[in-house]
Amino acid sequence: KQEVTQIPAALSVPEGENLVLNCSFTDSAIYNLQWFRQDPGKGLTSLLLIQSSQREQTSGRLNASLDKSSGRSTLYIAASQPGDSATYLCAVEDSSYKLIFGSGTRLLVRP
Amino acid sequence: DGGITQSPKYLFRKEGQNVTLSCEQNLNHDAMYWYRQDPGQGLRLIYYSQIVNDFQKGDIAEGYSVSREKKESFPLTVTSAQKNPTAFYLCASSIETGGGELFFGEGSRLTVL
């Protein structure tokens, strides 16, 4: 059974710092991996989608990498800002077309 | 604008009542999903539908029911058989299963009194 783990569960950093969020999964048979942002009481916003054949995706200050063989993905945020404060979730789409989510990393960027 | 609309945003229910949460999308997506989110936990899949008139159970389908009579609509009914229905419910859609980007609605928060 596919399991997705995100470490750390919470992170607090000063503004301007570069940071890395981690996501690991137990079964490498995935269609894709997606990173989301969730603000309190809101739905999820898609940040980056990495297909299983890709190694990384970039959007602005965000860069996500995927290493299927080791079951790992990282989300790199450059020059963090207070507006980046949110919960970040990763999810993998498994071989039965279901998206399996991690529990998320709560990020606080201090001014 | 294209997107996913969930209603109501907040809903209160007495024990023993069935309630239906609405999810409508105008993205022309084939696949639609319902997730439940509890504090400190990730999202758990309730039901999903890959095409009109077809749907499959997810990991926590007991006490819930769905229908998919139209491409743009995927309502979720929380029945009285659901033992712990208080949660945040999220609807999502993708152009297709197997590689498509997932788009979410703003969620519906259900509280059982």
Image (cartoon, coloured by chain):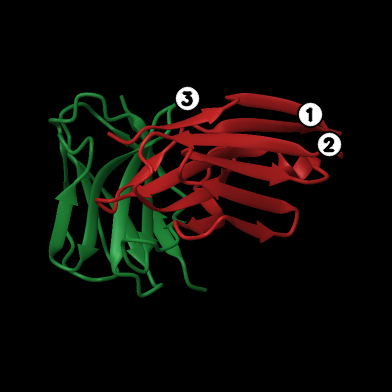
Q: Which residue is mark 2?
A: A17
Q: Are marks 1 and 2 in contact (CB under 8 Å)?
A: yes
Residue A90 rendering spot, x and y as whole percentages: 50, 42
Of labels 2 and 3, the one closer to you: 2
Q: Is residue A86 above or below residue A11?
A: below
Quarter of the view holding residue B98 = bottom left
Residue type at mark 3 is: Gly
Callout 3 crowding tier (Cα within 10 Å): few <14, some 14–19, many ≥20 = few
Residue at horizontal 21%, vertical 70%? B70
Camera-near label (3 vs 1) is 1
Note the chain letter of the red one: A
Q: Secondary structure at mark 1?
A: strand
Residue A13 disc label:
1
The three-letter code of the residue at mark 1 reads: Val
- Residue type beneath disc 2: Glu
**Chain seen in green:** B
Q: Position of residue A2 (x, y in %)?
A: 32, 36
Q: Chain of mark 1?
A: A
Q: Is residue A32 left or right of residue B75?
A: right
